[in-house]
Image (tube, grey):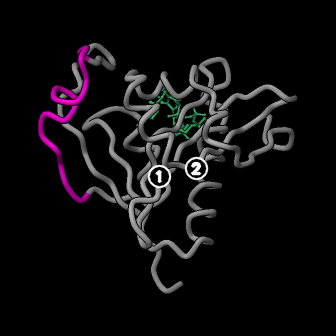
Amino acid sequence: MTDSITKIKEITASKAPMNLLLQADPSIKNVEYYLRQSKCFIVTLEDQIVGACVVKPISENTHELMNISVDPEYQKIGIGRKLLQYVIAATREAKVRRLEVGTGTFGYQLAFYQREGFRVYSIEKDFFLVNYEEPIYEDGIQLKDMLRLMLEFEGD
Ligand SMILES: CC(C)(COP(=O)(O)OP(=O)(O)OC[C@H]1O[C@@H](n2cnc3c(N)ncnc32)[C@H](O)[C@@H]1OP(=O)(O)O)[C@@H](O)C(=O)NCCC(=O)NCCS
């Protein structure tokens, strides 16, 4: 429905919408840290920022998706998927071979990434216990371990 009127563009990371990014990653310290070395993409709808995604170059061949978030009022109408597909295409065009992402071991986000071709390659036990001061809950379950997912661009 909103597909034709949303716009996606890259902005300077220092202008990233913190309110949205903190929804996906509640640690302001972590977000500020990775923003300094990252690219930021936003989705706008009638000049309002409704989505954001942060991607950090890890090496010449690998980038990591650090954060993706859509304003709760505009979730579940396809904006997140469109933004993820845009970021995947931009990464592929930059001749990067791998796009990685870390996410919880349960929840709809896993399907969100895997639908676009991401595959699980490892697990970081206790990641959310060690790296966050406050416990994080989703659907009443505490997030403890992180799954590492990877999308490889073959034959480019
Ligand atoms: C993850 C997120 C960016 C997805 O954005 P979105 O605009 O809601 O996603 P889309 O509308 O493109 O939906 C993609 C799929 O995810 C599903 N989905 C999105 N939000 C959901 C929710 N809260 N519960 C269950 N499924 C959900 C959609 O139903 C859709 O699946 P379908 O095609 O089978 O219907 C967004 O939900 C968000 O900001 N979440 C909070 C932050 C977060 O968890 N970020 C990811 C950290 S790993």
Q: Could you classify mark 1 by the number of other residues whose Cα lies within 10 Å: few (under 14), some (14-19), or many (20 or more)? A: many
Q: Secondary structure at mark 1?
A: strand
Is the residue at mark 2 in contact range of ligand 1, meaning its CB lies under 8 Å from it? no
Q: Where 9 sits versus 140, above or below?
A: below
Relative image position of residue 7 (x, y in whole percent): 80, 43
Q: Could you classify mark 2 by the number of other residues whose Cα lies within 10 Å: few (under 14), some (14-19), or many (20 or more)? A: many
Count of marks placed on residues: 2
Query: Which kind of residue does numbered mark 1 sit on?
Result: Lys
Q: Where 95 sits versus 25, above or below?
A: below
| Magenta extent | 121-135
Residue 56 in the figure: left or right of residue 30: right
Residue 28 in the figure: left or right of residue 145: right
Relative image position of residue 80 (x, y in whole percent): 60, 39
Q: Nearer the viewer, residue 18 or 139?
A: 18
Query: Which kind of residue does numbered mark 2 sit on?
Result: Lys
Query: Could you give the CA–CA distance between mark 2 and mark 1, rounded to whole angstroms?
Result: 6 Å
Q: Secondary structure at mark 2?
A: strand
Quarter containing the N terminus: top right
Image marks 2 and 1: residues in contact by CB distance under 8 Å: yes
Q: Nearer the viewer, residue 37 or 82?
A: 37
The residue that mark 1 highlights is 56
Residue furthest out toward the bottom:
155
The residue that mark 2 highlights is 39
- The verdict on residue 25 being magenta is no
Task: Identify the residue shown where x is 55% and y is 76%.
Answer: 95
Q: Nearer the viewer, residue 20 or 80?
A: 20
Q: Where 56 sits versus 1, above or below?
A: below
Task: Identify the residue shown where x is 23% and y is 40%.
Answer: 146
Q: Earlier in the sequence, mark 2 or mark 1?
A: 2
Relative image position of residue 111 (x, y in whole percent): 41, 44
